[in-house]
Amino acid sequence: MTTASTELRIERETQALEDRVRFRRLDVDDAMAVCGAGLSAFCLVWLVYERLTPLSGGLGFWLSWYGVFLAVHWLVVRERSGPLAAADRLATVVLTTAGLCLLVPLTLIVGYTAYRGWAALRPTFFVKDLRYTGSLSKATDGGGAHAIVGTLEQVGLAVLISVPLGVATAVFLNEVGGRLARPVRLIVDTMSAIPSIVAGLFIFAVIVLTFGQNGFAGALALSVLMLPTVTRTSEVVLRLVPGGLREASLALGASEWRTTRDVVLPTARPGLATAVILGVARAIGETAPLLLTIGGAFVMNADPFHGKQDALPYFVYRLIRFPQNAQVQRAWTGALVLLALVLVLFVIARIIGGRGPGHAGPFKRRRRRRLDMKEHA
């Protein structure tokens, strides 16, 4: 077998593995049925609302329209394809509607934040602080560089603290167990219910009263909030690793520790990356613990261990309460930057972790292709 044919066969096999199987696509007939049912339901509800009854109100109109739309759509599909297909299409419409209802508020939040914060978003926002701004300054005069640096440092320190502890605790609960597993799991579950202000008060009493307010104290407070999320999510991810992989590794003579390190953790890497993202999302927007720990600052302080420091949530909370429109505009810009940071972190985690369990990134695919070519050469 030649090298060219081997490479072509490997490329086809890789492409076949990567192609997602879609069990059903929306064809023209289905689209026409949905559009026709929606239009018919709209006309019927409009006739009832406007001509036959004294009903009024936009919310009631659209709720009534949706109910009539489901009924009409079910009848149309039932007459054309039978009751089984009608039930399937009805469930599809309901689930699609639920997804759209979940997407609408998220889109509104992101869109409105971008609309309000875009006006003051300039390159200077990322390099300037509020050192030389006053009550008569324009929104574009100052910036939030000090808050961005503070957020990155505090969240980074919190990740360095909570992720190793959380993943190690999850490995203990899932792979080791024993008599201590139940009380440890109980403690983790209890920590999940701790209000963020209580975490801030705890760090305030233990750290701030002795060493003063600084960015590291804020990172400790955020790590208290991140730890249970990372632990519980990592434990669930580790449970999803097939037991056959562990058994095969142990059968080949590997120890339990090596099985966990070389088999379980690499297999669960995408899920663990998601666990880290959930922990960061839990903590990056918290304001209450930072009010008690970092102190806030109008100028740049890149040292999280000495002196007061700012953060984007604190920055937004403080400036949105000012009467000047310029300060309010800076607050919205800070909120927009905070959303962008969350998006960037999410994209990085998905690139590192892969798109899903068993998915190989581009580097692994190229390496696997080279190894297969060597074996068949």
Image (spheres, rainbow, N blue to C red):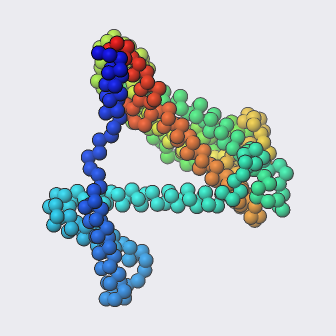
Which residue is rendered at x = 72% and y = 51% of the image? Answer: 122
Q: Is residue 61 above or below residue 364?
A: below
User: Is residue 21 rendered to the left or right of residue 307?
Assistant: left
Horizontal and vertical percent for residue 97? Answer: 36, 61
Which corner quadrant of the image does residue 2 belong to? top left
Quadrant for the C terminus, please.
top left
Count of labels shown? 0
Horizontal and vertical percent for residue 103? Answer: 45, 57
User: Is residue 237 rendered to the left or right of residue 72?
Assistant: right
Q: Nearer the viewer, residue 245 or 97?
A: 97
Quadrant for the N terminus, please.
top left
Horizontal and vertical percent for residue 265? Answer: 43, 25
Which residue is rendered at x = 45% and y = 41% of the image? Answer: 189
Q: Nearer the viewer, residue 294 or 145?
A: 145
Which residue is rendered at x = 20% and y = 68% of the image? Answer: 75
User: Is residue 129 rendered to the left or right of residue 78?
Assistant: right
Q: Is residue 56 above or below residue 92?
A: below
Q: Nearer the viewer, residue 329 or 197?
A: 329
Whether residue 290 is visible to the viewer of this picture, yes or no, is yes
Horizontal and vertical percent for residue 235? Answer: 41, 33
Whether residue 181 is visible to the viewer of this picture, yes or no, is no
Which residue is rendered at x = 46% and y = 60% of the image? Answer: 104
Which residue ends up furthest to the top in the rendered image? 253
Q: Is residue 289 above or below residue 159?
A: below
